[in-house]
Structure formats: structure tokens, C-alpha cells
């Protein structure tokens, strides 16, 4: 059932890439490895101010919608709907081709197709000699964007993810837009722990709905935990980049977030590399997918 109160057709971004290009503008450098302390808040505050002032109007509008409509109830509703995995049956490669039918306003001459971005990410990981499950995580990390093809608006597919049901961190980009989120008026959701308990572990925490959580759910029986964390949290910049929400994380989360941080530069900074040869790479990646996934995966 379509909830009429939601702006279902509100897609301010010309293409989904616009969000990722904006991320690259916000984080022009990869995070140095091994950093585990909280960021320099003065520096971070200045960077955030600069970002806010220079962000494109479309990106700003995208975050306004995202922060207004991602509520506890909305996330619960989307989980009920998509965790049933009753939309489609497709192999991993078929899902890549399906995602590639997503037509947005990206410039075909300068922007890469979705399949090319997936392959670029995976190829960069492969070149660095990482394990096969890591390469596969690179290939499939954005497959959850097929949510767009199921009719979900951009703000429910992409965007930095964040926990719902507890206080919003000030380090979330455009945090001021949470003023319009109805959860702001639910006192239970506005304490640091909210509906959760101290160090309960992120598996018990609901993140804003998007392609990360959906893809995690599709893949959860087939990949090692390290890869699943990459799929599930690669858009969670408030945690993997801004080091927020440590009070909800357990030891396992801290250990596995090292892999999310390892993955992130491959996602953000491999786009400007040369165009991958899709036909030539296909057999390698079909074999790789077959090593971990059944021929028909439920979506
Ligand atoms: Fe992604
Ligand atoms: Fe990506």
C-alpha cells in the first residue's frame, strides 16, 4: 500500500551519482588507516559549514527529504515489505543487468553506468590482491539500488545512513533538517540510547532505509561477516567516517568496521579510472558469484 503522506515521486537528484559525487566533495581524501579516535570536532564543524554552503540545491533538497521522511515507522514498514524477498529471483549477474536498466539523467559520455561502477570497484579490490569475498562485495555493494526500480524514491535508496529511534548525531550531514522529522517529537526516540541499550550491537539497531540494509538482507546467508558489514554499512558515514554512535556498538562491530573503512575508498575513489570491459570481465565475475551464491537469488 502506498502511503499518500510520503512524497513518492520526489527525486531531486539528476542521477544517483550526484549523491556520491557530493560525498567525494565532502570527503576528498580517504580516511587514513588505523584512526580510531573521534574526529577533530572544530575542523569537522568548519568542513560541514563549508559543505552546507556549497552543496548543490538538488543535493540539499535530497537530504531535506531524506531527513524528514526516514522515521522509525517508515523503516519498520520498508523492512516488512522487503525482508520478505518476494520481488524477484535473479542471479547476481542478472541483478547487475537489471540495475543497469535504471535510467537517470546521468551524462552517458562522462558518467559510468551502474554496472561499470560495480566492476570498477571490484577490479580495484582485485588488483590490490584482496580475498575473493572482498572482490565480490565490491561487485555487489550497490545492487540494492534496484529499490529504485521497485518504485522507491531516491531518499529511500541512497544517502548517508544513520540510526533511527535514538538522538541524531550533529555530525550527520544537514542535521538541521531533522527538525522536520516527526520522530523529533517522540521523547523516547530523542535520548542518546533511544529505544536501544548501551553497546547493544548494531545488529539490534535500525538504520535509515536504503540500498545497504536491503542488500545485506539479500546476501546475509552467503558471505562472511566482513563482507556483510561492507554491504550493510558502506553508506553509514556518521559511523565509519565521523566515528559517532560508539555507545550503540559492541566489540564485534568495532572489529568489523575496520573492513568497512578498508572498503570505503574503493567505493568512492575508483570512479575516475578507465572504463571496464564488461563483456570481457563477465565470465570471471559469474564464476566468482557462483562460488558464494546460488544460481537464483531471492530479491
Ligand atoms: Fe552504495
Ligand atoms: Fe558504490
Image: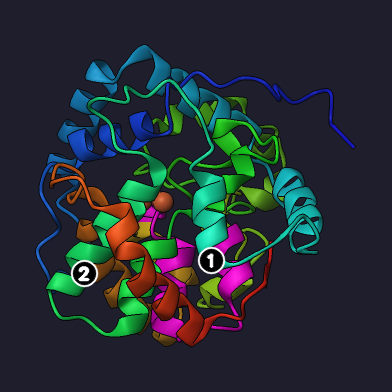
Distance between the alpha carbons at the discs numbered 2 and 1? 18 Å
Query: Residue, x 37% and y 24% (percent of image)?
Result: 106
Q: Quadrant of the N terminus?
A: top right
Q: Is residue 206 above or below residue 162?
A: below
Q: How many marks?
A: 2
Residue 117 point in image, percent of width and height: 32, 48
Residue 286 point in image, percent of width and height: 44, 72
Q: Quadrant of the C terminus?
A: bottom right
Instruction: Report the predominant secondary structure element of the magenta stretch.
Output: helix
Q: Label 1: how many residues lie within 10 Å, few (<14), some (14-19) or many (20+)?
A: many
Q: Earlier in the sequence, mark 2 or mark 1?
A: 1
Residues rendered magenta in the picture? 214-238
* Location of mark 2 (residue): 125
The residue lying toward the viewer, choosing from 34 and 45, is 34
* Location of mark 1 (residue): 92
Q: Is residue 178 above or below residue 138?
A: above
Query: Residue, x 31% and y 83% (percent of image)?
Result: 132
Residue 44 point in image, percent of width and height: 19, 42
Q: Can residue 26 be seen at all in this image of the molecule?
A: yes
Asked whether residue 61 is drawn in magenta, I would say: no
Residue 222 point in image, percent of width and height: 55, 83
Query: Residue, x 79% and y 49% (percent of image)?
Result: 77
Amino acid at each position: 500500500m502506498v502511503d499518500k503522506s510520503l512524497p513518492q515521486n520526489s527525486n531531486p537528484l539528476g542521477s544517483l551519482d550526484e549523491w556520491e559525487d557530493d560525498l567525494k566533495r565532502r570527503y576528498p581524501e580517504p580516511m587514513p588507516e588505523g584512526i580510531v579516535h573521534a574526529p577533530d570536532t572544530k575542523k569537522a564543524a568548519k568542513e560541514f559549514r563549508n559543505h552546507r554552503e556549497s552543496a548543490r540545491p538538488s543535493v540539499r533538497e535530497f537530504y531535506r527529504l531524506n531527513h524528514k521522511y526516514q522515521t522509525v515507522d517508515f523503516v519498520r514498514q520498508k523492512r516488512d515489505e522487503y525482508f520478505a524477498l518476494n520481488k524477484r529471483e535473479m542471479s547476481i549477474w542478472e541483478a547487475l543487468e537489471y540495475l543497469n536498466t535504471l535510467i537517470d539523467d546521468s551524462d552517458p559520455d562522462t558518467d559510468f553506468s551502474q554496472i561499470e561502477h560495480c566492476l570498477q570497484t571490484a577490479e580495484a579490490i582485485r588488483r590490490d590482491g584482496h580475498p575473493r569475498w572482498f572482490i565480490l562485495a565490491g561487485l555487489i555493494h550497490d545492487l540494492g539500488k534496484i529499490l529504485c526500480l521497485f518504485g522507491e524514491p531516491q531518499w529511500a535508496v541512497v544517502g548517508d545512513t544513520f540510526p533511527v529511534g535514538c538522538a541524531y548525531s550533529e555530525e550527520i550531514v544537514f542535521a538541521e533538517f531533522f527538525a522536520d522529522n516527526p520522530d523529533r517529537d517522540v521523547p523516547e526516540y530523542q535520548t542518546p540510547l533511544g529505544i536501544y541499550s548501551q553497546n547493544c550491537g548494531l545488529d539490534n539497531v535500525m538504520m535509515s532505509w536504503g540500498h545497504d540494509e536491503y542488500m545485506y538482507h539479500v546476501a546475509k546467508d552467503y558471505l562472511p561477516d566482513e563482507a556483510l558489514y561492507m554491504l550493510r554499512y558502506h553508506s553509514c558515514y556518521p559511523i565509519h567516517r565521523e566515528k559517532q554512535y560508539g555507545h550503540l556498538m559492541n566489540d564485534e562491530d568495532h572489529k568489523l568496521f575496520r573492513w568497512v573503512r578498508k572498503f570505503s575508498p574503493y567505493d568512492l575513489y575508483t570512479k575516475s579510472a578507465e572504463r571496464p570491459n564488461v563483456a570481457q570481465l563477465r565470465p570471471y565475475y559469474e564464476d566468482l558469484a557462483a562460488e558464494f551464491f546460488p544460481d537464483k537469488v531471492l530479491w
